[in-house]
Image (spheres, rainbow, N blue to C red):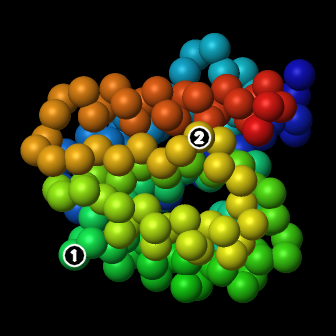
Amino acid sequence: MTSEFKKQLLIIAHAPSENTRLLRDAAFSGASHPDLEQVNYVVKAPLEAGPEDVLACDAILLGTTENLGYMSGALKDFFDRSYYPVLEKKQGLPCALYIRAGHDGTGTQRAVESIVTGLRWRWVQPPLILRGEWQPSFVDQVEELSMTLAFSVESGIA
């Protein structure tokens, strides 16, 4: 098949530290699995992404840190700039979320879920919260999340 039939996965990941950059790279790795033949991917930082990126995608993976019990300011800024331009055009957009939480991540999860509900996007699976001290297994979990989303989009499940 030609590339014009490919789906696009948008990965928006806030990565202010080495560990969160590892998570962003894991999301990229999952989305670029060699068996995925009909999915392109775009990886952007929240401050670099905008409504045009959402309008061009077929699914979105969000990655954020927990900041004072809330999503990163960068991800909130992305939502502030993108919400109304995409609201009516991207309802039902398949999405997934990972949160790097030093504490419990529930406030961050609630905040993102509230915005996603308003946008009427559709969760492909529950948010992944990476709680507490850094664990190398976090990388594998994010890679699996991204791969699952990408395969779901490619197969038409999502």
Q: Nearer the viewer, residue 131 or 75?
A: 131
* Residue 148 drawn above or below residue 76: above
Instruction: Find residue 89 and report its horizontal and vertical position in percent.
Output: 85, 71
Q: Which one is earlier in the sequence, the residue at label 2 or at label 1?
A: 1
How packed is label 1: few (under 14 Cα within 10 Å), some, or many (20 or more)?
A: few
How packed is label 2: few (under 14 Cα within 10 Å), some, or many (20 or more)?
A: few
- The quarter of the displayed image where residue 15 is located: bottom left
Q: Nearer the viewer, residue 106 or 10?
A: 106
Identity of the residue drawn at 46% across and 67% down: 110
The alpha-carbon separation of the residues under discs 2 and 1 comes to 25 Å
> Which residue lies most toward the top here?
35
Question: Is label 2 in a helix, a strand or a loop?
Answer: loop
* Horizontal side, residue 100 vs residue 54: left or right: left
Identity of the residue drawn at 80% across and 57% down: 92
Three-letter amino acid code at the position of disc 1: Leu
* Horizontal side, residue 20 vs residue 11: left or right: left
Identity of the residue drawn at 66% across and 80% down: 83
Three-letter amino acid code at the position of disc 2: Gln
Instruction: Find residue 42 and report its horizontal and vertical position in percent.
Output: 58, 49
Residue beneath label 2, please?
125
Instruction: Find residue 109 and report its horizontal and vertical position in percent.
Output: 43, 62
* Residue 83 drawn above or below residue 23: below
Q: Nearer the viewer, residue 128 or 156?
A: 128
- The quarter of the displayed image where residue 152 is located: top right
* Horizontal side, residue 58 vs residue 61: left or right: right
Q: Is residue 97 visible?
A: yes
Q: Which mark is residue 68?
A: 1
